[in-house]
Amino acid sequence: MNAASFIYGFLSALVLICLGLAAIYATLRKNRQRQANIKGYLDLIPDLTDTQRARLQEIRRVFFPKVEGIRQNMRLKRAELAELLFAEPSDRTRIYEVAGAVIERQSELEHDVIEHILEEKELLTPSQKQKFYEIIVEQFSWGGLGVHDVR
């Protein structure tokens, strides 16, 4: 085997590897972008009409800021709870008071997500409702509220 054949073969293999890696990268990037665009359960239903999507945006314009406020409050309360747990001396009364506030926020979040799901469900056709049901069952089976859980 001469040097020219070796170099040609090596470069051909290198080009093929680069093309393969580029294809894998493009696929992974597309999947990552698709996942980043998921803001709620109905984003997982591909056959929503333009009217349904417009109504969904109206619902989300109210819902997302509301639950973000709850999440922010919960994060602050959890940070306060962590500080209280390791403060000396321990103030058990205050610890349980703050823990109760965290539980109240969690309950409030659960309630708001349930109301949101019921509101979204009203937008759907029977076949879309079936898909929505399957999505909810899958998301809830992991524990918590799926895409709407505390991040």
Image (spheres, helix red, strand yellow):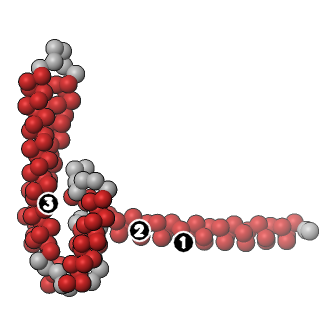
Q: Are marks 1 and 2 in contact (CB under 8 Å)?
A: no
Q: Image height check: is 57 above or below 108?
A: below
Q: Are marks 3 and 2 in contact (CB under 8 Å)?
A: no
Residue positioned 66% across, 71% down in the render: 16
Which residue matches tag 1? 23
Q: Image height check: is 60 above or below 68?
A: below
Spatial separation of the CA atoms under disc 1 and disc 2: 12 Å
Which residue matches tag 3? 113
Residue positioned 13% across, 62% down in the render: 114
- Amino acid at the residue labelled 2: Asn
* Residue occupying the far top of the picture: 89
Q: Image height check: is 95 above or below 44?
A: above
Which residue matches tag 2? 31
Q: Earlier in the sequence, mark 1 or mark 2?
A: 1
Q: Earlier in the sequence, mark 3 or mark 2?
A: 2
Which one is closest to the eye, mark 1 or mark 2?
A: 2
